[in-house]
Image (cartoon, rainbow, N blue to C red):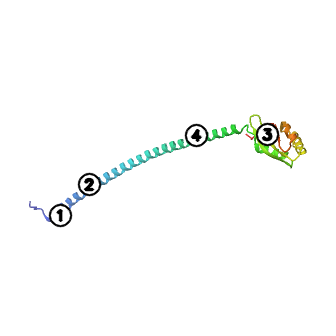
Amino acid sequence: MINLLPEKEKEELIIEEQKKIILILGILILIFLISLLSILFSINIYISGQTNVQKIILSQEEKNFEDSETKNFQKKLEFLNQDISNLNSFYKDQISLTEILDEVSNILPSGAYLTSFSFTADNSQISLAGSASNREILLEIKNNLEKEKKFSQIYFSPNSWLDPTNFSINFIILEFGKIPK
């Protein structure tokens, strides 16, 4: 087509056409930016929602872990308490033989030696066998045992008085040397 308009109007039409193109491009760019912002906003909402869900799951797992760890600790504690209780009940009525041996060694004068030591827990009876160089030492052992209030029912075998080199003594312990509770 032939354009018969004057040059000035032709230029105005071109300028007007350019304005329309710029306006259309501006609107398209604005629509693109609005779409981009709405997409980014929806992604932001989705990610924050997923983050909150993960935080909730994490807090529940931490609570479950703490609960299971607490239960395990309580089981171990109960097991150890049971062991301690069993040990206490075992040692409750036990007699400390180290204290008895200490007392017996204090009773023996020089010149007397033990060759055998026997302890019966059922009736708290001690049997000693040994040798003494003479009857006076054996008599001193007897007197020392009788002085001790911790021992009772002291019995020397008759053969001990005949042959002090092979004596045997039996006696009972009275509530002595109990292991503390």
Sequence-wise, which precedes: disc 1 or disc 4?
Answer: 1
* Residue ID for mark 4: 75
Q: Secondary structure at mark 3?
A: strand
Q: CA distance from mark 4 to mark 3?
A: 46 Å
Q: Residues within 10 Å of mark 1 (few under 14, many from 20)?
A: few
Disc number placed over residue 127 in the picture, else none: 3
Disc 3 versus disc 1: distance between alpha carbons? 138 Å
Identify the residue at image location x=71%, y=39%.
Answer: 91
User: Which numbered disc, 3 or 1, marks the residue that appears first in the sequence?
Assistant: 1
**Distance between mark 2 and mark 3 Cα atoms:** 114 Å
**Three-letter residue code for mark 4:** Lys
Relative to 165, 118 lies left or right: left
Q: Mark 1 against mark 4, which lies toward the viewer?
A: 4
Q: Quadrant of the N terminus?
A: bottom left
- Residue plotted at (87% across, 39% down): 146
Earlier residue among tags 2 and 3: 2
User: Badge 2 is on which residue?
Assistant: 28
Where residue 174 appears, as percent x and y from the top left, is: 81, 36
The answer to whether marks 4 and 3 mark residues whose Cβ atoms lie closer than 8 Å is no
Q: 10 Å neighbourhood of mark 4: few (<14), some, or many (≥20)? A: few
Asked whether disc 3 touches disc 1, contact meaning CB atoms under 8 Å apart, the reply is no
At label 3, which amino acid type do we have? Ser
Whether residue 33 is visible here, answered yes or no, is yes
What is the spatial separation of the Cα atoms under label 2 and label 4, in whole angstroms?
A: 70 Å
